[in-house]
Amino acid sequence: MRVGSMEPMLTRNAQAGLTDLAVELVGKASELAGQIQHTVRESIGDLVRSMNCYYSNLIEGHNTHPRDIEAALEDKYSPDPKRRVLQREARAHIEVQRLIDNGNDLQELPISTAYFQWIHREFCQRLPDELLWVENPDTGAKVRVVPGKIRDGGVAVGRHIAPPAADLPHFLNHFQNAYTRNWLSKTQTIIAVGAAHHRFLWIHPFYDGNGRVARLLSHAMLLRSGVGSSLWSISRGLARNVTEYKNRLAGADAPRQGDYDGRGERPAAQLEKFCAFFLRTCIDQVEFMHSLLQPSELLRRMKLYTDDEVAAGRLPARSMSLLREALLMGEFARGQAPEITGYQERRGRQILTTLLKKGLLVSKGPRAPVRLGFPLDVVERWFPRLYPVD
C-alpha cells in the first residue's frame, strides 16, 4: 500500500475556519492557566488525570467507577477479578499521563515512532496479562500484545483495513515528516493535532491500545504546543460526544469525494470536519474547567460543603480558613495552622490533622507544607459535572 493512500495529512485551514478555532483555543487555554495558583494546579492535575483516564477508558467500553480508580491509586484493589483488572488499567493510564505532564516522558517529538512506542510500552507493561491478548481477524487465533512493539500482522477496525505490517515503517516515517513542527506555524501545529489523531488511528500501528495511545499522544502534542495542560482533558469531551467522535473518524477514513475534495486519496473535507470537531471539543473542555476553577465560585462551593460538614459534626469549626489559605496561597507551613484558624497551638494543629486525615489537605511528608487535596467525596460538591451522575 502506498503512503499516499493516507493523504492529505494537513488541512485547508482557511476554508474550514480552523485557524480561528486554533486562535480561540490558545486564548482560552492561556486564560485558564492564569487563574489558578501553580501549586494548586498540581493538585488539580491529579484530579484531572483520574478524570481523563475514566473517560478514555469509557470510550473503549470499560466503565471503571471513579471510586475504584481512587482506590487503585491507594493500592486498594477489588477482590472481584473483573473490577481489579479495570482498576489496574486505569492506574496504568494515570501513571503514563503523569509522566507526560511532569516532563518525564521520552524527550522525542510526540509524533515520532519512538515516542508513541514509549507510550504504548509504558501503558501496556503496567497492564494485567488478561488485557494483553487480541484476536486475529483473519485466523481467529489469539495474538499477544507486546508492550511497545509495532504489529507484525494485519488488523481491521470496523470497515477500515489498516496498512499491512510490511508497509508500516513507510507510513510511520511519512506520519512523522508530515507533523514535524519546525515547518509549521503555531496555529498549524495546533490544528495538526486533530489531523495526527485521525491519521495515527488510521495507521493503527499496534494490535491493541491504539485509541488510548492516540488520546495520550494528542495530550502530549497539545502540551508541547503550549495550549495543553494538566488542568483540562479532551477525553471528557470525546466521551460525552462519542457517537460524533467515532462518526467523524469513520468519515475521514472514506475515499476522496470528487475533484473538489483535495488531491489525496482521503477526503480533505472530512478531515477538516474532524479537526473542527476536535478543536471545538478542546475549547468546550477548557471553558468547562474555567467555569469550575473560577476562584470565587470554587471558594463558594467549598464553603457550602464545609459549612454542611461542620454542622453535621464531621469537620471542626474554622476548617474553611485552612482550605481557603491552601487555595489562595497554594500551600502553607504546618506551623501556620494556629495563626490561620485563630486558635491556640493545640487546637489549630488538631484541625490541620483532621483535614489531612480526610484528604482535604495533602502533603509530601510529615514536615512538608500542606496543599489542597481533592478526595472523591468532595468532587461532586466542589467540581459538579466532572463525572456523570450515577
Image (spheres, rainbow, N blue to C red):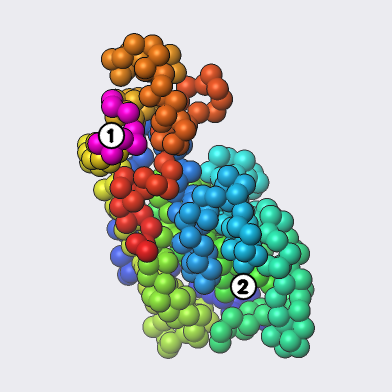
Give the secondary structure at mark 1. helix
Query: Is residue 169 shown to the viewer in this render?
Result: no
Residue situated in front as seen by the camera: 258 or 277: 277
| Magenta region, residue range | 311-318
Does residue 339 appear left or right of residue 191 in this picture?
Answer: left
Residue situated in front as seen by the camera: 377 or 226: 377
Give the secondary structure at mark 2. helix
The magenta stretch spans residue 316: yes
Disc nearest the viewer among 2 and 1: 1
Q: Label 2 amino acid? A: Ile
The quadrant the N terminus occupies is: bottom right
Residue situated in front as seen by the camera: 303 or 118: 303
- The numbered dot on residue 257 is none
- Marks 2 and 1, Cα distance to the nearest angstrom? 55 Å
| Place of residue 194 in the rendered image (x, y in percent of width and height, measured from the top left) | 46, 63
| Place of residue 346 in the rendered image (x, y in percent of width and height, measured from the top left) | 40, 14
Residue 243's quadrant in the figure?
bottom left
The residue beneath circle 2 is 203
Does residue 190 appear left or right of residue 342 in this picture?
Answer: right
| Place of residue 99 in the rendered image (x, y in percent of width and height, measured from the top left) | 60, 44
- Residue at point 48%, 80% (across, down): 250
The residue beneath circle 1 is 310
Residue 11's quadrant in the figure?
bottom left
Q: Label 1 amino acid? A: Val
